[in-house]
Image: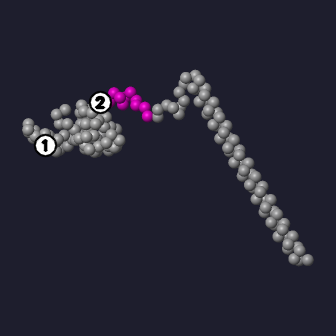
Amino acid sequence: MIVVLLALIVAGGIYYFITKRSAEGDTTLQSKIASLEEKIAVLEKEMADFRAKSATGGQAPSLVNPVETSPQEIEKPEKPAQLTTESKTKPVHPKTTQKRYHTVQKGETLFKISKKYGITVEELCKLNGLSRSQPIRTGQKLLVPAGK
């Protein structure tokens, strides 16, 4: 009799845990479905906003260039090129070619530097053994033409 009672208790416990687990699974599944439905609703709203803006000729926020230059930055005068002590102290000899270096400032690009010295980006790269895709670093010294 005790064995039968223990068997019923064990069977009841197993049944309880199985039904409880499936009920928890249903709750978890229902919350995931509700979360996905909310996300779909947000996406549908964004899509409708995008369609409305594209139909009216407005720009969608995701298509606006995130990097814009302010008018103040465009009108800032460029800093004069910094010369190293090497190029400042060497006497000028008419028969020898004097080397001149430019120290890269924050925000400068190969294009800006080449325009400052009146040469092309290709010439600047060739003088310094660089490729156009190679990044330059602030503080880096670049060889530039002395006569320009």
Q: Which residue is mark 2?
A: 77
Give the numbered dot on residue 89: 1
The residue sitting at 30% across, 40% down in the picture is 105
Closer to the chain start, of discs 2 and 1, is 2
Identified by mark 2, the residue type is: Pro
In magenta stretch: residue 68: yes
Q: Residue furthest top?
A: 56
Give the numbered dot on residue 145: none
Q: Secondary structure at mark 2?
A: loop
Mark 2: give few (<14), some (14-19) or many (20+) Cα within 10 Å: few
Residue extent of the magenta highlight: 67-78
Tell me where residue 47 appears, x and y as whole percent: 62, 32
Tell me where residue 111 appears, x and y as whole percent: 31, 34
Quarter of the C terminus within the rendering: top left
The residue sitting at 63% across, 30% down in the picture is 48
Q: How has the structure been colored for display?
A: one colour
Mark 1: give few (<14), some (14-19) or many (20+) Cα within 10 Å: few
